């Protein structure tokens, strides 16, 4: 019997979450962010299921975009990090990709390319402004001159201005308001469409919505917020990760379970072993007490997560047996809750699943 560790991906839930994002700004379009293999959900499958509904897709780099095009995805695809070298520009033209542009060096490459290829037309460029994240983006003082240079290029059909927030998931901090004020000042009188809102800003900062949203983690049912949020609480789990019990044993009181003997039974305890570990992407930092879902109620991890297995305490589950399915996160256990137990964020859990985990797609 094959190792039956399955990530069941609910494509209808992802579509519902996309609609929820767009409902926050009915005037706006939305780029569905499916970089990093759609945060571990499978970019091709997710894109093909949404292809007739979304306004555009967003990926990190051209390899991800080409994979989608060659799988038959026809909607616009935005390269969020733009092009890394001039050799990518013919591919951007050939496949019809949209590209961000975040540096003077990229603009020089684009001008050289269009000078050498005067017949190229229809390029869509998203000019990224560094409004305080200090990761990618042009200096605000250079925005006017760069827009003028882009406007002078006959091969550029459309320009969108974009930026990214550092702390939109922390509503009580002033950082986002400061970034918005800088963007407002920098873009005063600029009539190009704007795109500032990641998932957190979609749900928390309506003043940042403008013409294009960029929902990411919320598409998959994960919340960017550490606390409950009225909109995030409406999201549906895009993935349910399950695995069977593969062994059960009786552990005497005083005996330890797992590497490092970190968990010790304080009474005779039934312990179940599950076929999942950190080599599958389940976090090694999940401590004893991290919940799992078994037969309609919670159980908890007992001992350290190892490479291929974890062990759980069956106290309160007298009827549990080998073969029973255990949910690690999903419909009954929020991936946010599991991430908090691991002192990380849902992004790392979802995108960190390895190829050993079988993906199973459902449409309802």
Image (spheres, rainbow, N blue to C red):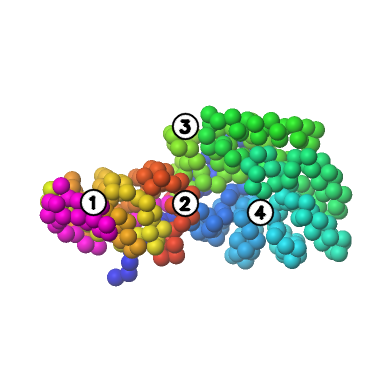
N-terminal of the pair, mark 1 or mark 2, is: 1
Q: Disc 3 to disc 2, how far (Cα)? A: 23 Å
Residue 86 vs residue 114, the one in the foreground: 86
- Residue holding disc 4: 81
Badge 1 crowding class, 10 Å Cα cut-off, few under 14, some 14 to 19, many 20 or more, is some
Residue 74 vs residue 284, the one in the foreground: 284
Q: Which residues are magenta?
A: 239-266
240 drawn magenta: yes
Q: Are marks 3 and 4 in contact (CB under 8 Å)?
A: no
Q: Could you tell whether 255 is left or right of 129 in the image? A: left
Q: Disc 1 to disc 2, how far (Cα)? A: 26 Å
Residue 79 x, y percent position in the rendering = 66, 55
Q: Is residue 147 visible?
A: no
Q: Disc 3 to disc 1, how far (Cα)? A: 37 Å
- Residue holding disc 1: 263
Q: Are marks 4 and 2 in contact (CB under 8 Å)?
A: no
- Residue holding disc 2: 348
- Residue holding disc 3: 230
N-terminal of the pair, mark 1 or mark 4, is: 4
204 drawn magenta: no
Q: Under tag 2, what secondary structure?
A: helix
Q: Under tag 3, what secondary structure?
A: loop
Q: Indicate which label's residue lies in the foreground, 1 or 2.
A: 1
């Amino acid at each position: 019997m094959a190792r039956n560790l399955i990530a069941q991906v609910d494509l209808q839930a992802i579509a519902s979450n996309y609609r929820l994002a767009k409902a926050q700004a009915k005037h706006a379009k939305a780029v569905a962010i499916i970089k990093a293999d759609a945060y571990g959900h499978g970019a091709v499958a997710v894109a093909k299921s949404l292809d007739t509904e979304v306004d555009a897709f967003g990926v990190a780099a051209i390899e991800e975009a080409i994979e989608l095009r060659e799988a038959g995805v026809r909607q616009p695809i935005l390269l969020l990090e733009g092009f890394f070298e001039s050799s990518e520009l013919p591919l951007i033209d050939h496949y019809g990709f949209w590209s961000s542009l975040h540096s003077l060096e990229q603009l020089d490459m684009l001008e050289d390319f269009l000078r050498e290829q005067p017949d190229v037309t229809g390029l869509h460029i998203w000019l990224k402004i560094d409004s305080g994240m200090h990761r990618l983006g042009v200096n605000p003082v250079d925005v006017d001159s760069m827009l003028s240079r882009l406007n002078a290029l006959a091969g550029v059909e459309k320009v969108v201005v974009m930026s990214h927030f550092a702390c939109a998931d922390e509503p009580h901090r002033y950082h986002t308001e400061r970034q918005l004020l800088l963007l407002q000042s920098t873009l005063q009188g600029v009539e190009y469409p704007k795109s500032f809102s990641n998932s957190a800003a979609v749900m928390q900062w309506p003043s940042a919505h403008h013409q294009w949203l960029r929902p990411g983690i919320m598409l998959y049912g994960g919340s960017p917020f550490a606390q409950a949020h009225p909109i995030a609480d409406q999201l549906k789990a895009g993935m349910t990760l399950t695995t069977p019990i593969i062994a059960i044993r009786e552990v005497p009181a005083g005996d330890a379970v797992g590497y490092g003997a970190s968990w010790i039974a304080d009474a005779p305890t039934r312990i179940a072993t599950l076929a999942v570990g950190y080599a599958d992407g389940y976090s090694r930092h999940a401590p004893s007490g991290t919940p799992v879902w078994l037969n309609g109620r919670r159980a908890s991890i007992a001992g350290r997560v190892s490479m291929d297995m974890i062990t759980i305490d069956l106290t309160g589950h007298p009827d549990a047996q080998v073969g029973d399915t255990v949910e690690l996160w999903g419909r009954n256990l929020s991936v946010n809750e599991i991430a908090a137990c691991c002192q990380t964020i849902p992004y790392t859990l979802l995108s960190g699943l390895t190829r050993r985990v079988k993906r199973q797609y459902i449409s309802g």
